[in-house]
Amino acid sequence: MLDNAGRWNAFAETKNAALLAASATALFGLTQASSNFIAGPKCVQIWFFLALGQLALVALLCVLSFLPRLRPHNAPTTDGVAPEAANLLYVGDVGRLTPSTYLKLLGFSDQDLTSNRYAVDLAKQVSSISQIGQRKYLFFNVSAFLIIGAILTPLAIPLALLARRAGVI
């Protein structure tokens, strides 16, 4: 499971890197053509600044997802998911289980938990890496919605203008 959690983190970092590259490329392209957008109609100017802001926020979130955590992750002290419903191979569930609950679900006894320090430390590490993965996926999800919003914003402006003309808004 430790290897699985590490691969999930690597996958999350790859996804964040792709979004960072896409948003940086779009930011570069928009700033290169900024004189065209600023000289355009008011609705184009609004879209331009909204898109710039969203793309900059995407880039910032993606960079933040790569920053190492300087404080150690604390294993949960209570289960954030019902143990009987937990998927023991899914980092989203494992990161919300206490290490002792995780080990018990894997078949370890209470005696094993007191005598096998390596298993307890391994469970803590799996929990920590799973929490890091959850954080990276949260950043990715927020960034993905923002970049989609930046792309779809130009479509919303003409629709809003049509709705205004029709008297809907």
Image: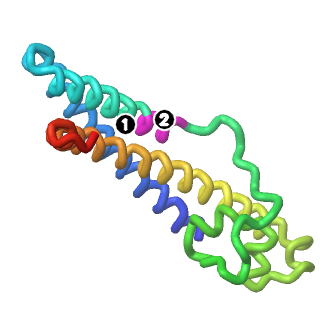
Residue 141 spot, x, y in % from top left: 42, 51
Residue 110 spot, x, y in % from top left: 90, 79
Whichever of callouts 1 and 2 sits on the residue coming sooner in the sequence is 1
Secondary structure beneath dot 2 equals helix
Secondary structure beneath dot 1 equals helix
Q: Is residue 155 above or below residue 106?
A: above
Magenta span: helix, strand or loop, mainly?
helix
Q: Are marks 1 and 2 in contact (CB under 8 Å)?
A: no
Q: Which mark is residue 12?
A: none
Q: Which amino acid, by three-letter code, is at mark 2?
A: Leu
Q: Residue at x 19, y 21 (%)?
A: 45
How does the figure colour the protein chain or chains?
Answer: rainbow
Along the line of sight, which residue is nearer the eye, 15 or 3? 15
Mark 2, residues whose alpha carbon is within 10 Å: few (<14), some, or many (≥20)?
A: few
Q: Quadrant of residue 94?
A: bottom right
Closest to the camera, between mark 1 and mark 2, is 1
Describe residue 41's horizontal placement relative to residue 3 as left or right: left
Along the line of sight, which residue is nearer the eye, 137 or 103? 137
Q: CA distance from mark 1 to mark 2?
A: 10 Å
Q: Which mark is residue 58?
A: 1
Residue 58 spot, x, y in % from top left: 37, 36
Q: Is residue 162 above or below residue 12?
A: above
Q: Quadrant of the N terminus?
A: bottom right
Describe residue 35's horizontal placement relative to residue 70 as left or right: left
Residue assigned mark 2:
64
Q: Which amino acid, by three-letter code, is at mark 1?
A: Val
Describe residue 60's horizontal placement relative to residue 26 as left or right: right
Q: Quadrant of the C terminus?
A: top left
Mark 1, residues whose alpha carbon is within 10 Å: few (<14), some, or many (≥20)?
A: many
Q: Residue at x 75, y 50 (%)?
A: 74
Residue 94 is covered by the magenta coloring: no
Residue bounds of the magenta highlight: 61-67
